[in-house]
Amino acid sequence: MMKVAINKKPAVPAARAMPAPRRPLPDAAMLGIAASAPDELRKQVENGLPFDSWERLQASAGFTTKQMADLVQMNVKTVARRKGTGRLSPAESDRLARFSRILTQAIELFEGDQQAAMQWLAAPRGALGGVSPLDVIRTEVGAREVERLIERLEDGILL
C-alpha cells in the first residue's frame, strides 16, 4: 500500500461580505433623519427631533410656519421657542413624524410627484367624510384612516 502525503493547510476563514449599507426609511429621510429601521426612528422621536426636521418637512410641504404649526398642533410662539432651542418635544416630534409618514405615502401613491401628492392631501375627499386628509391626520386614528385610503387607491379601488 502506498502512502500519500496529504498537504494539510490551516483553514482560512472565508472573507465575509460587508452588508450593504441600509437606506434610511423614506419618512425618516424626509425629516433628515438617518434611521433605517422603525425602532431607530422611534427612539429619535422619543428623544425629540432636531428643529431641522421641522424646517425640512415644512420646505417639502411648501407650508408657511402657521400652516405647519396648525397641522402639528403647535402655537407659532412655541415653534419660535423650539427653533431657539433646536429641538422639538417628543410629542411634537411624534406629530411631525406622522405628517412625514403620510406625506411620504402620498408621494409614493403619485409615483414621486410631490406637488400632486400635496394637492391630493389638501383637497376634500368623499371617502373621508368630505374633509381633506390634512385635516384628518391631526390624530393618529385619522392618520390610519388616510393610510387605509391610500392603500385602497394603490390597490386600484376607486372611491
Image: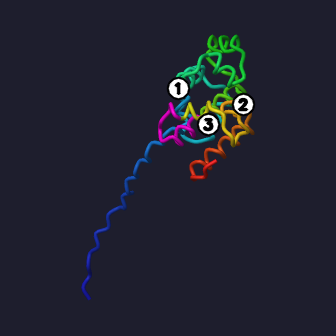
Vertical order, 92 against 102 (above or below): above
Residue 115 in the magenta stretch? The answer is: yes
| Label tally | 3
Residue 136 in the magenta stretch? The answer is: no
Please state the extent of the stretch shown in magenta in the rendering: 103-116
Give the crowd class for mark 2: few <14, some 14-19, many >=20 residues within 10 Å. Answer: some
Query: Do the residues under discs 2 and 1 have CB atoms within 8 angstroms?
Result: no
Which of the numbered marks, if any, corresponds to residue 60?
Answer: 1
- Which residue occupies 66% across, 27% down? 93
Amino acid beneath label 1: Ser
In the picture, measured across the screen, residue 10 lies left or right of residue 52, that is left
Q: Which residue is disc 2 drawn over?
A: 138
User: According to the image, what is the colour scheme of the structure?
Assistant: rainbow
Is 58 or 113 nearer to us in this picture?
A: 113
N-terminal of the two: label 2 or label 3? 3
Tell me residue 128's x, y (percent). Answer: 71, 40
Rendered image quadrant of residue 55: top right
Q: Which residue is disc 3 drawn over?
A: 102
Vertical order, 44 against 157 (above or below): above
